Amino acid sequence: MEQTKKKTVTVQIERFNPDVDSAPHDETYEVEAEQSDRVLDLLNRIKWYQDGTLTFRRSCGQGICGSDAMRINGRNRLACKVLVKDLGNHIRLQPLMGLTVVKDLVVDLTPFFAHYAEVLPYLINDERPPATERLQSPAERERYDDTTKCILCAACTTACPPFWANGKFVGPAAIVNAHRFIFDSRDRGAAQRLAILNERWGVWRCRVVLNCTDACPRGIQITDAIEQCKRAILAENV
């Protein structure tokens, strides 16, 4: 079997350490890479062999945990999913926008998860439970199946211009997770969630830019989910 050829890739990273830096600055690293390498592989090599001070989040490395979301050549992506072969010989990495940078590629996700909690992202049903599980038909499950795929990586919310403009906006990810339960036939909290989304910083702040749908690493049709929530609000007249 022919051995995969390696090449040298230039990785330009926006660095910022609030303890010593007054403003972000770029630092550049030359890294040996194969075409099949992921951006996460390059970051690991830099961290392990060139600059141990580089800071970024990582966990499963399989596109499931959502830990390593960042801007890769200007677009929100997961570092563990983007391949070198799709980026060329120069790669620029920056932290997600709209959230405070803790250090380098790590941002403070506290506001993001606060918005997530606002929409009551859990099953609400005080009815007496049946002897077995609460059953659904395939059609009932399909109604919200797409929005169950969210991994809370924040890529969609931090790609959203209205969220950049004002962090009070609940954001696409929170709306997606509200949608997941609003349209669940077993849930009884839809009216509560729709009332929350109908508030000043809810779904009506969405300007249908479509950045969120493009940024989602799971392929969720986020803009469509937001529009469904808007239509549900109008139908409920909450």
Image (cartoon, rainbow, N blue to C red):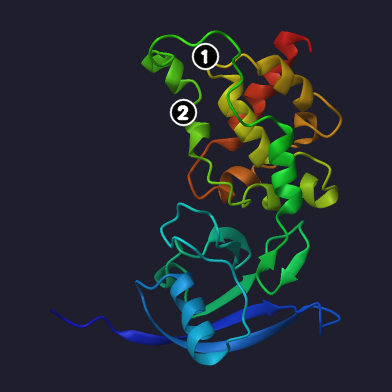
According to the picture, the residue beneath numbered tag 2 turns out to be 145
Q: Position of residue 234 (x, y in %)?
A: 74, 13
Q: Is residue 206 left or right of residue 130?
A: right
- The answer to whether residue 158 is above or below residue 36 is above
Q: Which of these two is toward me, 58 or 222?
A: 58
Say if residue 51 shows up in the picture. yes
Q: Position of residue 89 (x, y in %)?
A: 48, 80
Position of residue 164 in the picture relative to residue 2 (left or right): right
The mark nearer the N terminus, 2 or 1, is 2
Residue at point 29%, 84% (across, down): 5
User: Residue 123 in the image: x percent, y percent?
Assistant: 58, 24
Q: Position of residue 156 (x, y in %)?
A: 63, 47
Q: Number of labelled discs?
A: 2
Please name the amino acid that badge 1 sits on: Ser
| Residue ID at (58%, 52%) | 153
The answer, for residue 160, to whether it is visible in the render is no
Going by the numbered disc 2, the residue's amino acid type is Asp
Q: Is 5 situated above or below 157? A: below
Residue 185 image label:
1
- Which numbered dot is residue 220? none
Residue name at image x 56 percent, y 28 percent: 180
Q: Nearer the viewer, residue 75 or 232?
A: 232
**Discs 2/1, front:** 1
